[in-house]
Image (cartoon, helix red, strand yellow):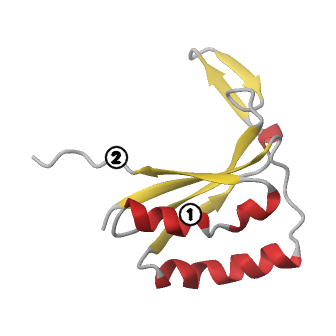
Amino acid sequence: MPQYGVLVYLPAPGDPMKISPEYEAALERYPAQVEELGGRGVAGYALQPSSTATSVRGGDIVTDGPFTEAKEVIAGFFILEAPDLDVALKIAKLNPVYLDGGGVEIRPLFAPPAE
């Protein structure tokens, strides 16, 4: 089954959110909804706020903060298996991050060509 990377975005600086009861309930429902649509979560990770990031540019320049200035920052990511992109999009749209003004980006994972 194809795999998709789902990047979770929050408004900068992406500080840890205060989890509302509505968000918590949506988060609890999410795994069952993913399976119901024919998908499977493989792995997921939340990141510390972007203010804790350290970036390396050009191999020698090390700076505090994320790589780019942005209105939104990556707050976490997960890997999802889904039959196709349409199902992956339906699953991604259920992510409760929307309740906190965030969004998601879905990308197929790179698969090396078969030899």
Helix, strand or loop at label 2? It is loop
Please state which of residues 68 and 64 is positioned toward the viewer in this rendering.
68
Residue that carries the numbered disc 1 in the rendered image: 92
* Earlier sequence position, callout 2 versus callout 1: 1
Report whether 69 appears left or right of 58. Answer: right
Q: Position of residue 15 (x, y in %)?
A: 85, 50
Q: Amino acid at mark 1?
A: Ala
Residue 60: % across, % down: 62, 14
Residue 40 in percent (x, y) is at 45, 75
Q: x, y percentage for residue 43?
A: 52, 66
Q: Is residue 89 left or right of residue 68?
A: left
Residue depicted at 39% across the width and 51% down the height: 108
Residue 82 lies, with reference to residue 50, above or below; the image says below
Residue 53 visible in the current orientation: yes
Residue hosting label 2: 110
Toward the viewer: 103 or 14?
A: 103
Mark drawn on residue 36 = none
Residue at (83% x, 77% y) in the render: 22
Whether residue 81 can be seen here: no
